[in-house]
Image: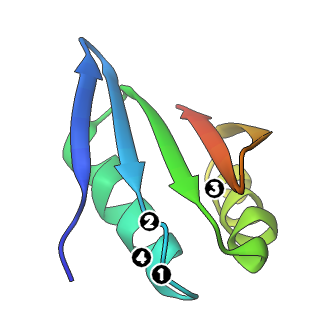
Amino acid sequence: MELKLKELEKERYELDVRGNTCPFPQVFTDLALKKIGSAVLEVITDNPPSVRDVPAMLETKGYKVETKKENGHWRLIIRA
């Protein structure tokens, strides 16, 4: 599996984890955050447990997470 991380603009990235089930969305999100530092990360997922578990894990690490429901998936917007 590859890390589908792309730069949207300066200091803003998108990570597409659609089609992955736990624990992969969480693992890929952790890897992406380590790679981009303090930039904003938008994670796209279609896995309902990830919408619950990824924000909970990140908030314990001090991140702020906003969740938006879109057409058949969710977008988690993560800020340091």
Q: Amino acid type of disc 4?
A: Val
Tell me which numbered mark, 3 or 4, is placed earlier along the sequence: 4
On screen, residue 38 versus residue 22, left or right, reads: left
Q: Which is more toward the observer, 39 or 8?
A: 8
Residue at 52% over, 72% down: 26
Q: Amino acid type of disc 3?
A: Leu
Q: Which residue is mark 1?
A: 20
Q: Which residue is mark 3?
A: 58
On screen, residue 75 versus residue 66, left or right, reads: left
Any part of residue 63 in sight: no
- The mark lying in front, picked from 3 and 4, is 4
Mark 4, Cα crowd under 10 Å, few <14 / some 14-19 / many 20+, is few
Q: Is residue 1 above or below residue 17?
A: below
Mark 1, Cα crowd under 10 Å, few <14 / some 14-19 / many 20+, is some
Instruction: Quote the CA–CA distance across marks 2 and 4.
Output: 10 Å
Quadrant containing the N terminus in the rendered view: bottom left
Q: Which residue is mark 4?
A: 27
Q: Amino acid type of disc 2?
A: Val
